[in-house]
Amino acid sequence: MGKVTTHVLDTARGMPASGLVLEVWREVGGQWSKLNAAKTNEDGRLDSPAIADGELAVGSYEFRFHVAAYFRAAGVDLPEQPFLDVVPIRFGVADAEAHYHVPLLVSPYSYSTYRGS
């Protein structure tokens, strides 16, 4: 069965982004609906798949990573209006039986992602 996982690394501090809140959204018929909200564990991962077996279907999805709140909670001094607040990563699922791993490498001023394994 297919699933979607993630892993968040704090590249500014060189460590996993523990305690970062993220939301999982899915587009159906032009409308976005929230499927899940979770917080990363001490390794920067979720304790269960972001989208689990039976929930994954072909279509468009979006992670919304709440990075400013994470960095503020970690004691990073950010301006009142941070450069990055919520980082959206929109991705497509072409095979509902596959494993999609969507990592995020993030700092207060930059981010990167890729399809992992």
Image: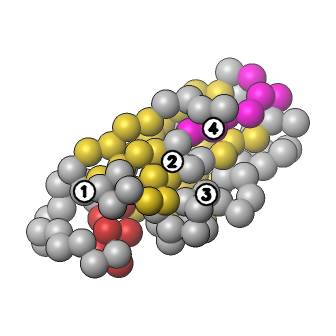
- For label 3, the crowd category at 10 Å Cα-Cα, with few meaning under 14, some 14 to 19 and many 20 or more, is many
Of the pair 16 and 82, the residue shown nearer to us:
16
Q: Is residue 22 above or below residue 30?
A: below
Q: Which numbered marker is on residue 63?
A: 2
Residue indicated by mark 1: 108
Of the pair 93 and 27, the residue shown nearer to us:
93
In front of the other: label 2 or label 4? 4
**How far apart are the two marked residues, 2 and 4, measured between alpha carbons?**
12 Å
In front of the other: label 2 or label 1? 1
State the residue at coordinates (33%, 61%).
Answer: 13
Q: Which numbered marker is on residue 66?
A: none
Q: Is residue 98 above or below residue 10?
A: above
Residue indicated by mark 3: 45
- Residue 6: x and y, percent? 59, 47
Q: Quadrant of the C terminus?
A: top right
**Considering only order in the chain, which callout, 3 or 1, is on the residue closer to the N terminus?**
3
Find numbered disc 4 in the image and state the secondary structure of the residue it sits on: strand
Q: Is residue 94 above or below residue 88?
A: above
